[in-house]
Amino acid sequence: MKYIKAILFILSFTMAFVFFSCKKGTEPEQLKPGRRDYVWTEDTLDVANYDYMIFRDIVGNSPDDIWLGTLDASSAAEFWHYDGKEWKSMPFPGLNPTALLLFEDNTLWAGTRQDYIWKSENGQWTESFKIKLEGYDQLAIYGMSGETKDNIYAVGRASINGENSDKGIILHYDGTNWSFVDIQDLGFVFHQIVYQKNIKTYFIFGSNNENGIIDDQIFTFDGQIVKKIISPYSSAALSKVKDIVYFNSSQKVYKYKNNNMVLWRDFSGTSFHSSFNGRSESDFFDTAYDGLGHYNGEDFKTIYKTHLDLQAKVVFDNDLFVTADDRKNHKFIILHGKLK
């Protein structure tokens, strides 16, 4: 009898172990709500030509090694670095570093709005690539995405001086050279490109300003063909958190599944406004209508109210940095939040 009870006990324990093991393997990970106990500081950048500057892109591998690029309408080259203590304007061999891409080994790419793409290794600018498209006077790079250092895409605009004939462009780097991807003219300028690895798809954000009416669109790109996938009636934005791409339109956030847009969260009635960046689906930051917004997996709340016009963001384990435009005082600010 004792022997039978022992066998039954072992069987029940084994079945329970298998059940809980399977349950653990099949259920989605339960994420903890993101924390909101930050200490905030505002660093003012000493920028002389405020009226001609937009801080467009910010990248970094750690809170004490961050790079900041600009969309600069003047002839000055503003390129900034943060070493954990202060922000400094750094030498840049070209003009207008509008799009930055940083790899884990600190290889840094900088696309510009002046026909060049630059490469930096170990803190030194080592290569430059002149890009030219027949029939167009000027090329500008606005976004870059690379899963490996020999497979990088860049998107932007080709234009003709004095004409309203902007064309969206895509370039590819194969580890040696940059070349144009032959795509149809969709009438949109491309501003951003991101990649979702599990579905092997690139997503591109583009816009068209015709007769003063701005039309934002999201496209898919498979390396050859560009396809429109969303046509919102109001602003659209493209976000990426933990290798998943999200699309927001009219305070609704979607995921891309089986070639369709699937609603993930509806933030209607909140101050949710634009694209976001963060650590997980329960810990990301958005430029809200009244400051910096945060979603912790349970609710969306403005955690830093400010009159500043918040722009690009980079997030680390315990820190986040946001570029900001202080229009009242004509200054540029870096908002830094650090968890207590």
Image (cartoon, rainbow, N blue to C red):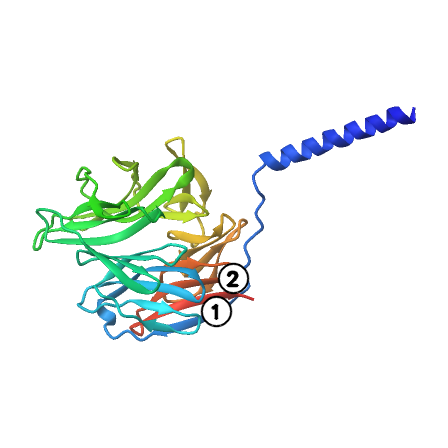
Residue at x-position 27% and y-position 70% = 91
Q: Is residue 280 visible?
A: yes
Identify the secondary structure beneath mark 1.
strand
Question: Residue 29: horizontal and vertical position, in percent?
Answer: 57, 42
Q: Residues within 10 Å of mark 1 (few under 14, many from 20)?
A: some
Q: Amino acid at mark 1?
A: Trp
Return the disc, 2 or 1, that comes first in the chain's sequence: 1
Question: Residue 243: horizontal and vertical position, in percent?
Answer: 43, 45
Q: Nearer the viewer, residue 167 or 14?
A: 14
Q: Amino acid at mark 2?
A: Asn
Tag 2 and tag 1, C-beta contact below 8 Å: no
Quarter in which the N terminus is drawn:
top right
Residue at x-position 18% and y-position 37% = 184
Taking the image as shown, residue 108 lies to the left or right of residue 24, namely left
Question: Residue 106: horizontal and vertical position, in percent?
Answer: 38, 59
Question: Residue 315: horizontal and vertical position, in percent?
Answer: 45, 58
Q: Residues within 10 Å of mark 2 (few under 14, many from 20)?
A: few
Q: Which residue is mark 2?
A: 318
